[in-house]
Amino acid sequence: MIFCEERDDAQTTKWVKEYLSSVDVLLVTLIGGLVVYWVVFYKKREEVVPEFKKLSVQAPSSSQETSFIEKMKKTNKNIVVFYGSQTGTAEEFSNRLSKDARRYGMKGMAADPEEYDMSELSRLTEIENSLAIFCMATYGEGDPTDNAQEFYEWLQETNNSLDGVNFAVFALGNKTYEHYNATGKFVDKRLAELGASRIFDLGMGDDDGNLEEDFVSWREQFWPAVSEYFGVEATGEDCSIRQYELVVHNDIDVNKVYTGELARLKSFEIQKPPFDSKNPFLAPVATNRKLNKGGTRHLMHLELDISGSKIRYDSGDHVAVYPMNDTSMVNKLGEILGSDLDTVISLNNLDEESNKKHPFPCPTTYRTALTHYLDISNPPRTNVLYEIAQYATDPKDQENLRKMASSSAEGKAMYHSWVQESRRNIVAILEDMPSLQPPIDHLCELLPRLQARYYSIASSAKVHPNSIHICAVVVEYETKTGRTNKGVATNWLKNKVVTDNGNKSSVPMYVRKSQFRLPFKATNPVIMIGPGTGIAPFMGFIQERAWLKQKGKGGGETVLYYGCRHQKEDFLYQEELEEYERSGVLTQLHVAFSRDQEHKVYVQHLLKQNKENLWNLIDSQTAHIYICGDARNMARDVQNTFFEIVEEMGGMTHNQAVDYIKKLMTKGRYSQDVWS
């Protein structure tokens, strides 16, 4: 056996040697081939590469396109005013500040932080006597606006030194909200932490009070501080400075004229997803019905068909709609100003380097601009009054307009009384000052943009994947001057009948995401408080809880506190809610009818009556609390009621109760979708 094994080993050794010889030959051949390939082909490729790179370098540099520093140098600007704007007000204020700079021999530019590389802030020191101003609005639950989101995140993460950078911040917010001016406060604090020099105190604008007055007061103190800091002086009297020049198109292809589109020409005729704020979807109106059974108000339920749009939404999201101004108001403006509204025009920016070439899509007609693009319903701000004062032929009118635009106590009081409290829009002002005849093109330059209106979606995509529901009350009231003012969007929506002369009515819309969300676990109880049209997002929540229950995934208590004036008049969705209660989807339905008895009863009174049950749900069963509706009164009163319940039932001091609720907010268990 041993011999046999030795013989087998010898044969194996011989076979291995022969095999390795074959492999060696193969390896040598492969290596040789690779060497030849590298010498002949790869070396040639190396020689070609530099030539290819030279060609690619000729493409425009994206870094230059996003450099506000290079743009400032090129246009000899030394002040940049960045804006974080959701509704256009912060952008408007930034434009006013950039124009102000001329009075002090300085040159300013307004800038959208979304369009520029904000990490270049440290390079501002390369420009002599430079200053960065930030007009920052706060949106939602203390969040930055959409266009300031990236800048906000960069500020949070960066450790770049901003030594030598001069800055000032004006914050825009609303005191009725929990996180008042949070974004402006953060930007002001963080810039200072990074070493930048604050040349003037943080301005605090309160939209619940008088935002315009807050801004004017801050601005009037801000510029003298700038003047002292940089050692410059005002050049003299204020003067009206046009930002755009008028071009009238007498012979233009109608296919090149904007008719209401927001960005892409003909986007309403040829719809292309994705749909967003610049590219809204034209959603056909599938349903438009009155919800209330009586009373003088009109509360409505609309359903927008989003079939084929690829739009997705979640319960709690918002739908944005782009309304049109009332035709009679537009015609009245044209009549007062003696203008042909069908004239095709362009307003072109006199600053050729500006990213904003026009104040609204151009070329277009005056009629389209006043119908789709400009806000003609709200009282104009003081800067508009100042600019148009020069066109009043009556010296008294001119004096009053300039006085109202000033920062004097008398002027502020007059503006507050004559314009704001009386709710005079531009049409009313022109009617009440017959000597005032501004050129229509200058007026179009000055008026702010007509903004999208946001509504809490009143449906669940789990149940209604192809439609979005809206619940709204039509706004209509009489002013102190005896005029009837109508809400732009709600009156426009009210008149959106399902078919209009055989054609389907449509609404330009898109979906804005929200943090107002049902808990991840369907077993968590939810407590919803939403009087009036505050019921809207909860209709979506309840529909979704019903869907989950049907799928066998539910289980958590679903509690609703709703309020209205009269049970027989404006109990919205009464039949649906009572059916949800009968089927066990709504485990508790509490309704406060505020005016059905001698003393008024509101949702907060019902909350107090059920304090034991609420405390058990919140403290023992980790319930999530949701509040939707009026921020100024209802949301504040409800929050104070929860403070009282926690204090009493939890055996806490008031401060401990406040901290308890604040912790729920931090954990996402106390959410608000409110408006003022």
Image (spheres, rainbow, N blue to C red):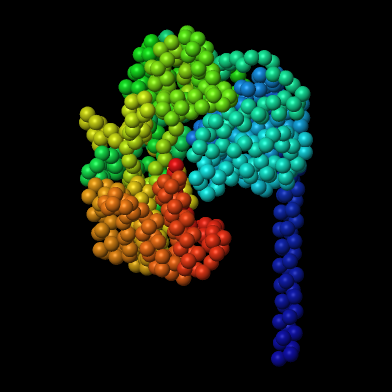
Q: Quadrant of residue 287?
A: top left
Vertical arrangement, residue 7 with respect to residue 31, above or below = below
Residue 93: image x %, image y %? 57, 29
Vertical arrangement, residue 593 with respect to residue 266, above or below = below
Residue 490: image x %, image y %? 34, 36
Judging depth in this view, the residue of 125 and 408 nearest the camera is 408
Judging depth in this view, the residue of 62 and 95 nearest the camera is 95
Residue 88: image x %, image y %? 51, 32
Q: How many marks?
A: 0
Q: Quadrant of residue 148?
A: top right
In this rendering, position of residue 336 left or right of residue 163: left
**Residue located 39% across and 60% down the image:** 607
Residue 318: image x %, image y %? 42, 45
**Residue located 74% across and 39% down the image:** 196
Judging depth in this view, the residue of 153 and 338 nearest the camera is 338
Which quarter of the image is occupied by the C terminus?
Answer: top left
Judging depth in this view, the residue of 397 and 219 nearest the camera is 397
Q: Residue furthest front?
A: 598
* Residue 16 appears in the rendering: yes
**Residue located 46% across and 51% down the image:** 636
In this rendering, position of residue 495 left or right of residue 528: left
**Residue located 33% across and 54% down the image:** 601
